[in-house]
Image (spheres, coloured by chain):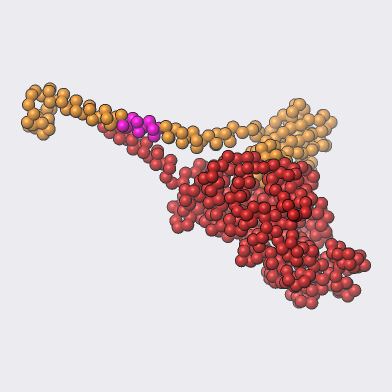
């Protein structure tokens, strides 16, 4: 019969002397001895692997998170002295690297009125590469409702671009800087 | 007993995962995909040259491209420097036509996609570019009146089938050009406006025919493109599409730490723009200031996009219209060359300054200041192993 203890008495140590409890304690001691070597080994290996894993994760994700923490790329902002609200968006909705593009600059006063007949000078460049814009974008059209078409923009590289607008109208002169990150 | 084994198995998987198959981040994969040749868009029509996609024009252009008769002394053609079996370049530090020039011959694969031509962008269309060596005294050294007479005598029928009737050249001097020697300039000045216009028009059409031919010269698929395609589709790379660990390291550096991809971007590995990267001048050549001196040249060219010989609408002239005309960044700025095939065509840079890719990589790592103007590049710590990896990767663009 194989009862609760029959397995040990018949299969494992059928000839072992002593009481049932002695036999069990021998087994437990032997098992404990083997497991602790394994545990140390495993713990060592595991810790090493964990360290490698953590380092790999840090190493692989660091450049990406650095890129994410870039400059302010909002497309609508107050001008530096607060005279205007300016928004700057690509006319076709998407930025395409390496092609001449037109963008729209929309100017409103603090009270939300459209800014008309503004004189706008455009400059910019890539602060990390010691160079200005590869083209000379210009305002080519006024589309009404404070919207100005700016043609001749070209983003030739990926990275951080800056576009500065010097705006002058009846409401006064002000400047604004937009960051574009490709 | 089971839990430690699971833990061990997990850790082994983590370790193996970190150093087995090429492991690229999503951002890296995106960049690699953007460099692959399959992302090269279809060649846009050139509205400034209405013969750009006319097969007969391309055929005549091909004839002219290889014709030694298209030079002053009958010894030089476009193909003398743009050698068909050498990626349309000549392996020399500076091109040699009738004389020795001061610039490296550029290869032609994908040339029709450029917004600017020559190392300094002194021409704004492929057809206007093709005219320039014809009259350069160091290249083909001819003059436009001679070319017009030659075309009429040699290829008159073919020309007229494409471009319409040739004008009457009676009374037009055999040698005349506003850019020629004193006698040729004097002869040009004796001609009336209608004669000058007639000669200029035939001359422009020569350029348009050659440009039509050159539009067919496109980059070909490399090992990198096969690798990139497999990476993008998740297919298992086979044969030469498998990159060695060194090539993978080089690719990661190219698009990462070494910042090469900032300028060498897109499927042609160029931003088609101009940069001062501190490339040193060549001692025995005349002063060379790059893009800054090319601005006036392209503006003065009667064959530029604003000129009378452009076909189509002026709307095509955006590059010339919005060109940067005067900025310090143009000093000693030269066009970013494509890196496709570069590994098998030393020497490098606009006057063949460097004889190997090792020297090129060393130059960009050191980032010495420019002799004039400001270099855009910053010094970079690259180990010998990393430099070798970059070169190994560049070779995959030429295999």
Measuring from the top left, give residue B335's x and y in whole percent.
69, 51
Measuring from the top left, give residue B111's x and y in whole percent.
67, 58
The chain that appears red in the image is B
Please name the residue shown 34% across and 31% down the image.
A44
A46 in the magenta segment: yes
Where B95 sits versus B71, above or below?
A: above
Where B257 sits versus B3, above or below?
A: below
Compare residues B70 and B169 and report the one nearer the observer. Answer: B70
Magenta-tinted stretch: A41-50
Inspect this view and state whether residue B219 appears: yes
A17 in the magenta segment: no
Magenta region, main secondary structure: helix
Query: Would residue A24 appear left or right of A152 to someone viewing this image?
Result: left
Residue located farthest toward the front when viewing the structure as drawn: B284
Please name the residue shown 70% across and 31% down the image.
A77
Q: Chain A is drawn in which colour?
A: orange
User: In what quadrant of the picture does the N terminus of chain B appear?
Assistant: top left
Query: Would residue B152 appear left or right of A66 to someone viewing this image?
Result: right
Please name the residue shown 36% across and 37% down the image.
B10
Measuring from the top left, give residue B121's x and y in whole percent.
74, 53
Please name the residue shown 76% across and 49% down the image.
B289
Query: Would residue B109 appear left or right of B325 to someone viewing this image?
Result: left
Q: Where on the picture, by quarter, is residue A54? A: top left
User: In what quadrant of the picture does the C terminus of chain B appear?
Assistant: bottom right
Where B317 sits versus A56, above or below?
A: below
Measuring from the top left, give residue B331's x and y in whole percent.
75, 46
């Amino acid at each position: 019969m194989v009862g609760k203890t029959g397995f040990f008495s018949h299969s494992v140590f059928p000839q072992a002397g002593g009481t049932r409890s002695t036999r069990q304690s021998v087994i437990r001691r032997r098992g404990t001895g083997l497991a602790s070597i394994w545990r140390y080994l495993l713990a060592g290996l595991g810790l090493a692997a964990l360290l490698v894993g953590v380092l790999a994760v840090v190493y692989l994700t660091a450049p990406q998170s650095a890129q994410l923490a870039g400059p302010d790329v909002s497309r609508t902002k107050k001008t530096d002295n607060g005279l205007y609200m300016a928004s700057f968006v690509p006319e076709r909705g998407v930025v395409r690297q390496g092609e001449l593009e037109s963008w729209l600059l929309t100017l409103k006063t603090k009270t939300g009125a459209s800014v008309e007949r503004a004189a706008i000078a455009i400059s910019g460049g890539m602060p990390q590469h010691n160079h200005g814009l590869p083209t000379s974008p210009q305002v080519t059209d006024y589309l009404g409702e404070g919207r100005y078409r700016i043609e001749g923009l070209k983003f030739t590289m990926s990275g951080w671009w800056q576009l500065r607008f010097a705006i002058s109208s009846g409401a006064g002169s002000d400047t604004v800087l937009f960051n574009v990150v490709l | 007993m089971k839990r430690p084994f699971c833990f061990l198995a997990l850790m082994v998987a983590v370790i193996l995962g970190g150093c087995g198959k090429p492991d690229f981040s999503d951002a890296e994969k995106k960049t690699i995909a953007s460099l692959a040749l399959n992302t090269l868009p279809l060649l846009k029509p050139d509205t400034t040259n209405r013969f750009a996609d006319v097969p007969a024009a391309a055929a005549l252009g091909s004839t002219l491209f290889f014709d030694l008769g298209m030079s002053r002394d009958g010894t030089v053609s476009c193909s003398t420097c743009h050698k068909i079996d050498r990626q349309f370049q000549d392996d020399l530090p500076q091109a040699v036509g009738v004389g020795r020039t001061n610039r490296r011959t550029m290869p032609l694969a994908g040339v029709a996609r450029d917004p600017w031509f020559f190392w300094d962008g002194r021409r704004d269309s492929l057809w206007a570019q093709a005219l320039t060596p014809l009259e350069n005294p160091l290249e083909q050294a001819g003059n436009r009146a001679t070319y017009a007479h030659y075309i009429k005598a040699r290829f008159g029928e073919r020309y007229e089938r494409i471009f319409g009737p040739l004008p009457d050249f009676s009374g037009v001097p055999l040698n005349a050009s506003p850019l020629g020697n004193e006698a040729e300039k004097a002869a040009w000045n004796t001609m009336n406006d209608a004669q000058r216009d007639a000669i200029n028009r035939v001359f422009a059409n020569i350029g348009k025919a050659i440009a039509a031919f050159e539009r067919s010269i496109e980059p070909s698929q490399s090992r990198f493109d096969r690798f990139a395609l497999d990476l993008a589709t998740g297919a298992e790379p086979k044969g030469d599409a498998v990159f060695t660990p060194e090539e993978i390291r080089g690719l990661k550096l190219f698009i990462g730490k070494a910042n090469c991809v900032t300028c060498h971007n897109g499927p042609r590995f160029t931003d088609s723009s101009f940069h001062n990267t501190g490339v040193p001048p060549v001692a025995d050549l005349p002063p060379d200031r790059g893009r800054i001196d090319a601005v006036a040249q392209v503006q003065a060219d009667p064959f530029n996009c604003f000129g009378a010989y452009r076909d189509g609408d002026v709307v095509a002239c955006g590059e010339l219209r919005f060109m940067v005309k005067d900025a310090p960044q143009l000093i000693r700025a030269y066009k970013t060359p494509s890196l496709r095939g570069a590994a098998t065509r030393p020497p490098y840079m606009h006057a063949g300054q460097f004889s190997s890719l090792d020297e090129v990589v060393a130059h960009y790592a050191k980032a010495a200041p420019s002799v004039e103007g400001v270099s855009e590049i910053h010094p970079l710590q690259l180990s010998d192993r990393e430099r070798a990896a970059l070169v190994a990767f560049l070779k995959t663009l030429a295999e």
